[in-house]
Amino acid sequence: MTPATLSPGATPLGFGPTTNKLLQPRFRVSAAQAFPSFLPKQVEIIKDPFARKLATRIERLPVQVSFSEGSIMSSCVKPLLQTNTTPVVLLHGFDSSCLEWRYTLPLLEEAGLETWAMDILGWGFSDLERLPSCDVASKRDHLYQFWKSYIKRPMLLVGPSLGAAVAIDFAVNHPEAVEKLVLLDASVYSEGTSNMTTLPKAVAYAGVFLMKQVYLLKSVPLRLYATYLAFNGLPFDTCLDWSNVGRLHCLLPWWDDATVAFMNSGGYNVSSQIERVKHKTLIIWGEEDQIISNKLAVKLHCELPNAIIRQVPDCGHIPHVEKPSVVANLIVEFSQDD
């Protein structure tokens, strides 16, 4: 099965509440599609063929930012085709990577959209050996310089979960770079990590160290539980494999430093910016989201001046993984709607 053959509402590879195992046999990447050398070696244990396929396409591009002397080699998935249509730029959620888009990105490309998936500064697979600041302003500047260097046209910016806060913050500060917004199960009403700014740095490091031990040494319980909450009725084998996909970027050596830097910065607090967004916006929300109530979808719809809302039945917190055909169709229709 290829992404193009998924029927509307179907889950990739037959995943869903009635599926009890991952498709076999295990997918293997050919020599012509080798994984980039900068990815952690644990990418080899991932079974999901769509994740493995997208991982082979991850590149690092130099991005010169204002807060660092040298360029940051920034990870992304470049489009397979260049078009005259509005480019679609896919962000990801908190402590995640572009691999979130392993099912939906191919569908958007099948529909003829020029589609980018980029890793937000501090997360994903960028080279942060010379660790830059990872606060909100730095993430915003990094996204802007990436856009200015490579995309260069007003874009349809897509932000899931905390990526929605990244998208709103960016659209308000750089409205010329954005044509439209798509927000999925948006985490935009939290108050960031402001309480962490009062903690001694050693305490923050201790928290990240413990979290990393859980991720790397014990790993399965915490990530499995988070994945279980994020999706609606996921089979155990699939939950385990998706947990490995979700934690892959945490195995990079600078992950803990970048996490501490973001926690100490105070994080995103964009609730006061929402009404300043003038761009046409599509809100997508999983009706069975166990992480962020869909009541907040209605609140967000009321506060955004120029928004429409679509709810996805039988879907949890990450619709672009759980219901990729539905999300792809909504994005394609929205991109074409003038």
Image (tube, rainbow, N blue to C red):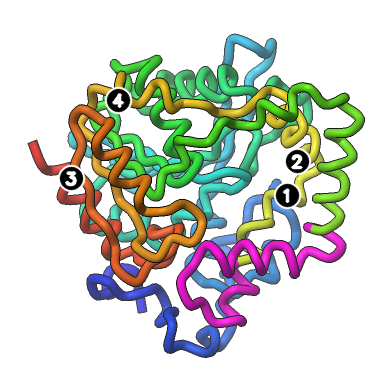
The quadrant of the rendering that contains the C terminus is top left
CA distance for labels 2 and 3: 35 Å
**Type of residue at label 1?**
Cys
Residue 207 pos. (x, y %): 84, 42
Q: Earlier in the sequence, mark 1 or mark 2?
A: 1
Q: Nearer the viewer, residue 276 or 66?
A: 276
> Mark 1 = which residue?
250
Looking at the rendering, the stretch of residues picked out in magenta corresponds to 215-242
Q: Magenta stretch: residue 234 in it?
A: yes
Instruction: Tell which circle, 1 or 4, labels the residue nearer the N-terminal end.
Output: 4
Which of pointers 3 and 1 lies earlier in the amino acid sequence?
Answer: 1
Residue 95's image quarter?
Answer: top right
- In percent of width and height, residue 3 lies at 34, 69
Q: Earlier in the sequence, mark 4 or mark 3?
A: 4
Q: Which mark is residue 255?
A: 2
Give the residue number, with chain letter if any, for mark 3.
Answer: 334
Q: Position of residue 166 (x, y in %)?
A: 47, 31
